[in-house]
Image (cartoon, rainbow, N blue to C red):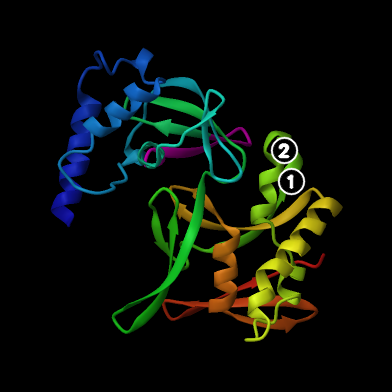
Amino acid sequence: MNNDNNSTEDSYEKIAEAPTSKPYSLDSLDNLDALSQYIKSTKGTREGRAIPPLEKWHPEDIADMDLIIKANGEWWHEGGQMTRESLVSLFATILWKEENNGTTEYFLKTPVQKIRIQVEDAPLLINDVGIVHEDDMSWLEFTTTTGDVVRLDDEHSIVLKAYNSNKSDSNKSDFSESDFSESDFNNSDFSESDQANQMSTADDVADSQELASTEQVRPYMMVRNGLTALIGRNTFYHLTEIGALSEENGKTILTLQSGGQSYSLSMPTD
């Protein structure tokens, strides 16, 4: 495994040291096809998905691309949705985040150029969670739509943050798919008799909340290189079934177990 990682990293470094020439000139990397070919050429011989050593790359050239990751996880380029999952997953491997003068910026980063893109909310989206057992230990393992797999631990924690849907009116109708509040839990005690009605009840609650306020609470998880992932609504419901719900000081607490540790989420009051 280590040899594969070293081989992949060496191939990236060789590309970074090589002079840029067509079809991978700086002027052409803001083209989707050219960029995808460039990334593929640097992957080396390792099979499967590999995250390159982005932290070792320090390109001086910066370009802009009309590419936006919407709040519902969709990737759009020049006004059209990118429907090739393999291409989106490929580009997700070079996602990079920077804080510049108090402003968060996102890039597709290569050894020779950083290509600035726009992100409405989180750059990644988690759509699956499961329990895995390893060395007599149980872990909560999360998977993103673009292929990242991460386990809940101290470095990959879950937080609840407010999101203002007014930030992007063009995609406003999609926001309700991932909005949560304490009332989602209070209307579901997850007893056997209520589980069948859980989804429709919570959907009604979320719809009423969206009408009442444009600011919703959403769950996010740290994934890699400072990149966070929004936890999708169905996945979060699954978490509430896996974890334990309790009441403390008038708030609903969701407690999750992973890697022998307990992690608690306190839902804010409405």
Q: Residue at x 47, y 32 (%)?
A: 107
Nearest the camera: 116 or 149?
149
Residue 205: image location, x then y, percent: 77, 64
Q: Callout 1: 10 Å neighbours few (<14), some, many (20+)? A: some
* Whether label 2 touches label 1, CB < 8 Å: yes
Q: Give the residue type that dot 1 points to.
A: Asn
Looking at the image, residue 141 lies above or below residue 86? below
- For mark 2, give the secondary structure: helix
Q: How many marks?
A: 2
- For mark 1, give the secondary structure: strand
As drawn, is 145 to the left or to the right of 208? left
Extent of the magenta region: 92-105
As drawn, is 53 to the left or to the right of 222? left
The residue identified by callout 1 is 164
Query: In the rendered image, which quarter is residue 130 located in?
Result: bottom left
Query: In the rendered image, which quarter is residue 59 located in?
Result: top left
The residue identified by callout 2 is 167
Q: Main secondary structure of the magenta part?
A: strand
